[in-house]
Every structure is written in structure tokens, then in C-alpha cells.
Amino acid sequence: MDDALPTVPKKGPIKGRGSVGNPTGRYEPHVRVAVDDGWAPDEDLPPLRTTVTADATRTIIARNTSPDIGFDQSINPYRGCEHGCIYCYARPRHAYLGLSPGLDFETKLFHKPDAAKLLDAELRKPGYECKLIVIGADTDPYQPIERKYQITRQVLEVLSAHNHPAAIITKSNLVLRDLDVLSSMAERRLISVAVSVTSLDRTLARIMEPRAATPPKRLEAIKRLSAAGVPVRVMAAPMIPFLNDAELEAVLEAAKTAGAEHAAYVLLRLPLELKDLFEEWLQTHFPGKAKHVLNQLRTTRNGTLYVSEFGSRMKGTGVYAELLAQRFKKACARLGLNKQRGPGLDFASFRPPPRPGDQLDLF
């Protein structure tokens, strides 16, 4: 056994954090197990502190070839996310850093200080093809540390200067801080924002997403973005059986009232370590529902908790998944959501701005 033990030896809810435990990442040579041998004083440990480390990344645009994702370019200004959402499918990525997808994911964060400079250089490459860039496809670009580091804003300023279209995914009302840049980009059809609203129940939201904005603040963000002319999509995601799935129509209606024009939903995904993390969280917070939630999820994943196949991994299969899809479709039709295919972003106006000393074009 490794000498280094997790910082939280006692199981149970941790105030302000989503994960209950801090299991060893799948690539580590040793498994660390926290134990109470009776010698430790019977008192609470000090609060877990968030640490932020500079990430010396050399590229900023991540690319994917997934056929069931509507984009192949994305930017994540941060690794890890202090929001602490227990269901976050990005958690297993922390294992690549030699860290736990559990509490480490929420407390050991990384920021990319050179993101804007790297992006500007990449957009200026002669062979670059202008395609949609999604900001926050993995971790939230407006998580709390963005207030200090402002990397997301810097990235937006570069995209705006290049007339490059982008889409943002967030569950934070901090997005309103950048309304000046966003409204300017919206006037040129260069931006859309997807706001995740998982539940309208503040108590449930606090348990699932302990450091994210409250549901009313997210709806207020939708309202103000829409009023500023920014196209807004609501993400009712993830839908979790017996926890928040009954709220699907209510979430869509509240978002439509606030000004959302488009909507999407995703059935809970539990890849890799997330299966155990989520089950432990369920047993801690909702022991009476845990068995029902997991069994219903298995009916949508061919008897397991996760199937990674493209096409079905986002929505699932089976009776429950089909009913959820029908409910979503009918609610959108009734509310007038998704009338148009998308925000109609402008890809033709992309052009890197001249730098000091650059020779001007003759034509």
C-alpha cells in the first residue's frame, strides 16, 4: 500500500463538495485506501482547500471525431472543476494527471495561462479551417476561479477579434460578466450560449452541483443573455431517473419563459470511475432511491451502467429512454423550442486581424 493516504478518511457528505470519496485513478500503480485505525482524534478534518496550478499546455484547441457530437473543435480553459457536479463525465480525465476523479477533480484544478496566445497563433496558421469552437465541452469555463484568472474572457476576445464563431456551455451566471463581448459577437452572428439547468429544486441542485449557480441565477442568465441578443440553448442535462427526470418539462418551460430558443437533453452517462463515484454518492444522499435509480439506468444501457457506443451513449435505449425522448420532443413542440435548426452562425467572416508591423493586403 502506498504511504500517501487520501485526505478524507471518513465516508460521508463533505460540505461544499460533490464527491464523497477520493478513489485512486485508474492509471496509478498503487491503490490508496483510507482507514481509521482508532488512533486519530475523533474530530473533523480541516476543510478541503482548492489549489490551482498552471497547466503548461502547448496547444489549446482539442479535436474529436465523435459522430454523435455536433462539433469537432473545443477549448477548455481549465482542467478539473470546482462546481463539484457528481455526474460530470469529465471526472475520469483527472486520472490522466495522476489524480483522483473524486475529490481531486473538485479541489486540484489547473488553469491554462497561455490559452489566448496559443489560440491566436493557431487561428493564424495558413492551413487553419474555420469551424465551430465550443468553449467548455468538458469543464465549465465560468467556474469560480474564472473570476480571478479570466482565461475564458481572454479566449473570447481573441475569437471576437478574428470574427470566429463559437459556442459556450456553462451553468454559471458568471457568463453575464462578459456580456459586452458576447453581445458584440452576437451582433455579428458569432456566438451562442448553452446554459445547463439540471433541476429547479434548489436543495437537489445544491446536493448534485454544490458550488454551481442556483437554478434561479441560471434562469436569470438565460433571460439577460437573450435580452442582449445572444442566442441561448437550455441543456436539461443530465436527466437522472427518480431524481430529476420528472422535472424535464418544467425545466424546458422555465427556460423558454426566460428566453431560450433551443433545447437539448442528455441521459446520465457514467463512464469509467464515474460509475462507482455516483453509486457512492447515491448511497450517501439518497439511500432509499439508490437501487431504483441504478436499476432504471441499467434498463437504458443493455443491463449495465454505461455503454460507450456512439449514437446511444447520450440518450440510451429501451422503454424508459424512448419515453424520455418522446416527452422532450412533445414539450419542445408545445413550447416552440428548436423551431430553427440552430443559431445560424457566420463562418464566412473569419479573418485574423493584422498585427503591428504586418504588411497590408493590396486587395
Image (spheres, rainbow, N blue to C red):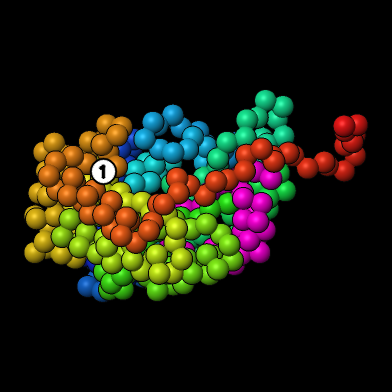
Regarding mark 1 in the picture, which secondary structure is present there? loop
Q: How many marks?
A: 1
Q: Nearer the viewer, residue 49 or 60?
A: 60
Residue 314 found in image quarter:
top left
> Up-down: is 264 above or below 347?
below
Q: Residue 150, position in %: x, y?
A: 61, 59
Q: Residue at x 52, y 64 (%)?
A: 226
For disc 1, the neighbor class at 10 Å (few under 14, some 14 to 19, many from 20) is: many
Q: Please indicate whether residue 66 sits to the left or right of residue 60 in the image.
A: left
Q: Residue 71, position in %: x, y?
A: 47, 38
Q: Is residue 252 visible?
A: yes
Q: Please indicate whether residue 250 sits to the left or right of residue 137 in the image.
A: left
Residue 252 found in image quarter:
bottom left
Q: Residue at x 43, y 69 (%)?
A: 258
Q: Residue at x 24, y 64 (%)?
A: 247
**Quarter of the rendering occupied by the N terminus:** top left
Q: What residue is pinned by disc 1? A: 315
- Magenta segment range? 163-190
For this orientation, the residue located farthest to the top is: 127
Is 172 magenta? The answer is yes
Identify which amino acid the numbered label 1 is placed on.
Lys
